[in-house]
Amino acid sequence: MKPNGRASVAPHAILPGSFDPPTNGHLDVIERAASCFGRVTVAVVVNPQKRQPMFSLQDREAMLKECTARLPNVAVEHFRGLLADYVKRMEADVIVKGLRAVSDFENEMSTALMNRSLSNVDTFFLMSDQRYSFVSSSIVKEVFFLGGDVAALVPEPVLRIMSAKRAGRST
């Protein structure tokens, strides 16, 4: 029996994020989580602390579904509200968060402790691959809209949708 009182043959992990837009760093963490846990739900959330998103929840969910389609144990959906409530509703065993730097850990530690106190579910931290340690959605958007090449930073489906958005075309 696990500390949260549930027995599980294939642990279910929730990997939350705003993913605006999804980056290769996000995809790397998702792939590695999928190799560690029986089931991974990528949960696209609204982060009230972030300014106006580039993409709607539904667009971010659709991009992630396309990028993870080859991973049979990964599902993608969106939700609103407290992560702890979502984790309980999904009967998840663990929360997974990717970390790029020490500052990410400092920001995530108190959130992980709060989520544990509210849901009795621990957070596992996965360090990003060094190739992506500098990549954030904010930096990708800034470079992209200033005309820089972000092809090495985002999956091809995301680049295609970002390019269409910049050109004023619907996807």
Image (cartoon, rainbow, N blue to C red):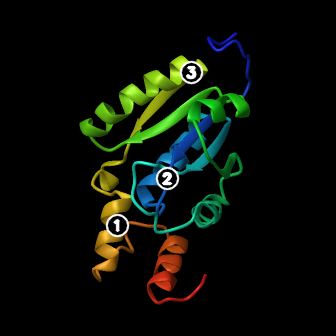
Q: Secondary structure at mark 2?
A: loop
The residue under label 3 is 118
The mark that comes first in sequence, 2 or 1, is: 2
Q: Quadrant of residue 62?
A: bottom right
Left/right of residue 159 with respect to residue 130 in the rendered view? right
Spatial distance from mark 1 to mark 3, Cα to Cα? 33 Å
The residue under label 1 is 140
Residue 18's label in the rendered image is 2
Residue at the spot 44% in from the left edge and 84% down from the top edge = 166
Q: Amino acid at mark 3?
A: Leu
Spatial distance from mark 2 to mark 1, Cα to Cα? 14 Å
The mark that comes first in sequence, 3 or 2, is: 2
Residues at marks 3 and 2 touching, judged by CB atoms closer than 8 Å = no
Spatial distance from mark 3 to mark 2, Cα to Cα? 21 Å
The mark that comes first in sequence, 1 or 3, is: 3
| Residue 57: percent from left, percent from top | 59, 60
Q: Secondary structure at mark 1?
A: helix
